[in-house]
Image (tube, helix red, strand yellow):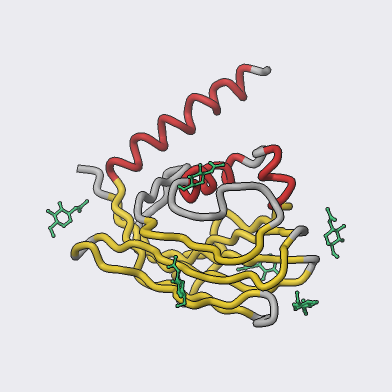
Amino acid sequence: MSSRFILLGLFVPLAFLLYTQSTFVKMTNVVCHSYNKSWAVFHYCRLKAYSRNKTSLNINATFLHPARNVSLGFALLKRANGYKPFLYNITIDACLFLRKRHNPVIKMFYNVIMDVSTLNHSCPYVGLQVVSDFHKISLPLPVPSGDYLVCLDFIFDGRTQFFVNIYARLVEDLL
Ligand SMILES: *[C@@H]1O[C@H](CO)[C@@H](O)[C@H](O)[C@H]1NC(C)=O
Ligand SMILES: *[C@@H]1O[C@H](CO)[C@@H](O)[C@H](O)[C@H]1NC(C)=O
Ligand SMILES: *[C@@H]1O[C@H](CO)[C@@H](O)[C@H](O)[C@H]1NC(C)=O
Ligand SMILES: *[C@@H]1O[C@H](CO)[C@@H](O)[C@H](O)[C@H]1NC(C)=O
Ligand SMILES: *[C@@H]1O[C@H](CO)[C@@H](O)[C@H](O)[C@H]1NC(C)=O
Ligand SMILES: *[C@@H]1O[C@H](CO)[C@@H](O)[C@H](O)[C@H]1NC(C)=O
């Protein structure tokens, strides 16, 4: 391993620690939409308010058929005269990832979602899927203050079946 990678390996967790403590993230809205209701149906998709500055994400959906070929599109947008692409727009083979866990960004995301959802296993996915009370948000990298939109596209067999869009406000609080 080159020293550059070792450095990066040290820097990222450090930045992560610093910024999770000094940055304040609040989810402000969530939108779930199924394009194909014969495959995915949402029963519930809402934020619950904890306090003035904290909300939790709650999703309850059913996959009516087994999803064996799942890709996840992950795009981050930042508001500036409308939402503009920011840093990430990637698509990964979720089934492969869940076996190998090789993408650091998605890995972070997965570690976060692991404890709070029924998605914490490998493919296939079928039946009731629940994300309950997700509120421990941590950031993999320093991110400036602003309004953000996380777009998650769930692609089964090469076609987007549904999306989950999460809006969040981020405030840097560097003393
Ligand atoms: C919608 O879901 C059904 C049931 O799984 C599937 O057979 C069909 O191919 C899907 N349609 C699209 C456009 O993906
Ligand atoms: C999910 O939503 C359905 C329909 O509203 C409900 O019957 C079910 O109890 C919910 N399940 C969980 C685990 O929240
Ligand atoms: C959240 O709000 C409470 C009071 O509403 C405040 O005491 C607390 O410091 C706030 N937390 C953050 C991280 O800003
Ligand atoms: C992400 O990239 C794909 C392919 O380039 C594009 O179709 C999609 O609109 C982009 N998503 C966002 C939210 O910008
Ligand atoms: C998935 O989460 C459930 C409930 O939190 C837990 O019981 C189960 O052991 C987890 N599975 C894996 C593979 O981590
Ligand atoms: C998943 O489906 C897409 C579109 O049908 C196909 O191109 C791809 O090879 C499939 N992947 C796997 C691992 O089967």
For this view, does 107 lie left or right of residue 102?
left
Residue 133 in the image: x percent, y percent? Answer: 36, 59
Which sits in the foreground, 75 or 101? Answer: 101
Which quadrant, please, contains the C terminus? top left
Q: Which quarter of the figure is the N terminus placed in?
A: top right
Determine which quarter of the picture holds residue 46.
bottom left
In the image, is residue 10 above or below residue 21?
Answer: above
- Say left or right for 59 vs 23: right
* Front residue of this view, candidates 100 and 123: 123
Most foreground residue, 147 or 164: 164
In the picture, residue 36 is in which quadrant? Answer: bottom right
How many numbered discs? 0
**Image position, residue 71 (x, y; %):** 71, 58
Q: Position of residue 76 (x, y in %)?
A: 54, 60
Which quadrant of the frame does ligand 1 lie within?
A: bottom right
Q: Which residue occupies 61% across, 22% down?
A: 4
Residue at 47% over, 28% down? 11
